[in-house]
């Protein structure tokens, strides 16, 4: 695939599967954004691969089958299957993927294989947990240290457990048991939502709409209980992530701004300077 089709790409490749984990031998962990209408060339899978769609849509061709993968869904494909990705023309397609050779003697892997049966590939909807685990797994490689391999091993195991529960129809929405929208519940929900979804949040109104509260109520409650505005809380999380990206990868300022869903690079630079004390380009040079 030509690099021009990639808005950004963060990849850790382990050639010859030299990174051995309890869940299996790791081949790749990647976070990629593909341009709308672009295509990832056809290839035969060297290993099993889990792909979580962060945003946008793409058609996944696996042997003779075609499946639409949308934001919030997971695609699984096994070793040896022919594989191709074609991004829908309306939006860019961003995803996180992990490729590995499963260790069938691992209990979590074995349970997942039993649940997935004879299928060589399939698409399922996330219950919210795979997204968060995928983000944490990628972040481990941004901040790689001697504990990273153990952390990634645990993240993959947890992803497999969650997928097994989804396949077995045992997944339950976190909020399905909530019977009333008290202030404490509302605050907990908005904090949980912002902590897990901050990379995708573009406005405070988006949070209110997603959680079915009024924007005025949430804004007033958050400031009263937390001592800062929702916008300040959100910007702090985004700038903390921006600092990690500036330190750990070669993304341009414009790419980071787009990744963090700022209105424009100019807005990103202004907010970054407000919280970090200098412009993003200056921070990178330090």
Image (cartoon, rainbow, N blue to C red):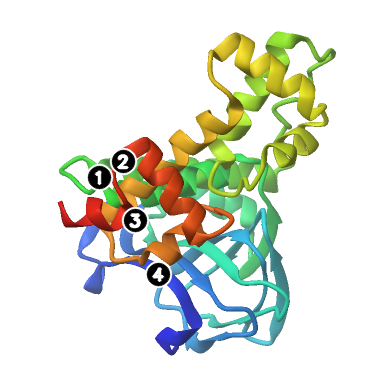
Q: Which residue: 63% across, 56% down?
A: 116
Q: Nearer the viewer, residue 25 or 269?
A: 269
Question: Would you place residue 34 above or below residue 101 in this image?
Answer: below
Q: Does residue 26 appear left or right of residue 130 in this picture?
A: left
Which disc, if any, is residue 148?
1
Q: Which residue: 55% across, 82% down?
A: 83
The residue carrying mark 2 is: 151
- Visible residue check, residue 106: no
Q: Where is the N terminus found, in terms of image quarters?
A: bottom left
Which disc, if any, is residue 9?
4
Q: CA distance from mark 4 to mark 2?
A: 22 Å
Q: Which residue: 28% across, 58% down?
A: 281
Q: CA distance from mark 3 to mark 1?
A: 15 Å
Q: Secondary structure at mark 3?
A: strand
Residue 190 lies, in percent from the top left, at: 65, 26
Q: Residues within 10 Å of mark 2 (few under 14, many from 20)?
A: some
Question: Would you place residue 191 above or below residue 253 in this image?
Answer: above
Q: Nearer the viewer, residue 17 or 111?
A: 17
Mark 3 or mark 2: name the one nearer the start of the chain: 3
State the image quarter where residue 187 is shown.
top right
Does the CB distance between marks 2 and 1 fall below 8 Å?
Answer: yes
Q: Secondary structure at mark 4?
A: strand
Q: CA distance from mark 4 to mark 1?
A: 20 Å
Q: Nearer the viewer, residue 279 or 156?
A: 279
Q: CA distance from mark 3 to mark 2?
A: 14 Å
State the image quarter where residue 94 is shown.
bottom right
């Amino acid at each position: 695939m030509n690099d021009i089709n990639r808005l950004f790409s963060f990849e850790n490749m382990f050639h010859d599967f030299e990174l051995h984990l309890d869940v299996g031998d790791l081949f790749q962990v990647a976070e990629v954004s593909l341009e709308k209408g672009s295509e990832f060339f056809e290839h035969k899978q060297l290993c099993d691969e889990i792909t979580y769609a962060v945003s946008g849509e793409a058609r996944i061709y696996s042997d003779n089958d075609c499946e639409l993968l949308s934001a919030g869904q997971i695609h699984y494909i096994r070793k040896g299957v022919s594989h191709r990705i074609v991004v829908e023309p309306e939006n860019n397609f961003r995803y996180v993927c992990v490729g590995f050779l499963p260790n069938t003697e691992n209990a979590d892997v074995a349970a997942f294989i039993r649940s997935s049966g004879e299928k060589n590939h399939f698409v399922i909807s996330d219950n919210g947990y795979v997204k968060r685990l995928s983000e944490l797994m990628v972040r481990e490689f941004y901040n790689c240290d001697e504990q990273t391999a153990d952390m990634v091993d645990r993240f993959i195991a947890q992803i497999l457990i969650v997928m097994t529960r989804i396949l077995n129809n045992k997944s339950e929405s976190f909020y399905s048991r909530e019977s009333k929208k008290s202030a404490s519940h509302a605050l907990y929900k908005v904090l949980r939502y912002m902590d897990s979804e901050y990379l995708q949040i573009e406005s405070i109104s988006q949070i209110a709409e997603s959680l079915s509260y009024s924007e005025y109520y949430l804004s007033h409650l958050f400031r009263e209980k937390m001592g800062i505005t929702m916008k300040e809380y959100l910007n702090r999380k985004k700038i903390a992530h921006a600092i990690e990206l500036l330190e750990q990868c070669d993304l341009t300022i414009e790419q980071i701004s787009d990744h963090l869903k700022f209105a424009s690079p100019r807005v990103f630079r202004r907010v970054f300077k407000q919280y970090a004390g200098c412009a993003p380009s200056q921070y990178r040079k330090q």
